[in-house]
Image: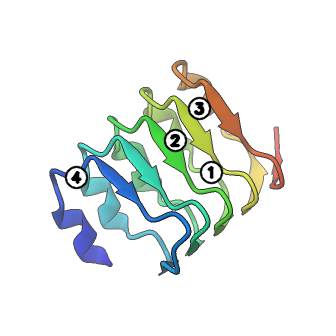
Amino acid sequence: PESIGNLSQLEVLGCYQSQLSGPIPETISHLTKLRTLSLWQSEVSGTIPESIGNLAQLEILAFADSKLSGSIPSTIGNLVNLTHLYLENTKLTRTIPESIGNLTQLEDLSLRQTKLSD
C-alpha cells in the first residue's frame, strides 16, 4: 500500500514467498534507511519505479520470481551501496541500463531467465 512510505525507520522489507500483489508504490522511495528490499517469489507486478534510485542505503535488492515487467530504470545506478541484485525469472525486457556500471560494490548479479539485452 501507499502508506508503506510512512515507515521511515524501516531497514529491512522482506515479503518473499508472499501473495503480495500489485505494483510497487512510488512511496517506497521514502524508505531512505532501507538496506534490504526483498519481494522474491511474490505476485508483485508492473514496473520498477524510477524512485527506486532514491534508496541510497540499499545493499540487497531482490525482485526475482516476481511478475515485474518493463525495463530496469536508469536510476538503479544511484544505488551505489548495492551488493546483491536479483532480477532473475521476471518479465523484464529491453536493455540493461549503462548506469548499472555505477554499482561498483556489486558482488552478485542475477539476470537469468529475463528478456534483457545489453
When the figure is inspected, residue 89 is found, relative to residue 109, above or below; the finding is below
The earlier-in-sequence mark between 4 and 1 is 4
Whether residue 24 can be seen here: yes
- Picture disc at residue 72: 1
- Which is in the foreground here, disc 2 or disc 4? 4
Q: Horizontal placement of 57 versus 74: left or right?
A: left
| Quadrant (top left, top right, bottom left, bottom right) of the N terminus | bottom left
Given the image, on which type of amino acid does mark 3 rest? Ser
User: According to the image, label 3 marks what residue?
Assistant: 99
- Which is in the foreground here, disc 4 or disc 3? 4
- Distance from Cα at disc 4 to Cα at disc 1: 24 Å
Q: Say whether marks 4 and 3 touch (CB < 8 Å).
A: no
The earlier-in-sequence mark between 4 and 3 is 4
When the figure is inspected, residue 8 is found, relative to residue 32, above or below; the finding is below
User: According to the image, label 4 marks what residue?
Assistant: 10
- Distance from Cα at disc 3 to Cα at disc 2: 7 Å
| Quadrant (top left, top right, bottom left, bottom right) of the C terminus | top right
Given the image, on which type of amino acid does mark 4 rest? Leu
Q: Say whether marks 2 and 1 touch (CB < 8 Å).
A: yes
Q: Quadrant of residue 45?
A: bottom right
SS category of the residue bearing label 1: loop
- Distance from Cα at disc 3 to Cα at disc 1: 10 Å
**In this orientation, which residue lies closer to the viewer: 92 or 98?**
92
- Distance from Cα at disc 2 to Cα at disc 1: 7 Å
Within-10-Å neighbours for mark 4: few <14, some 14–19, many 20+: some
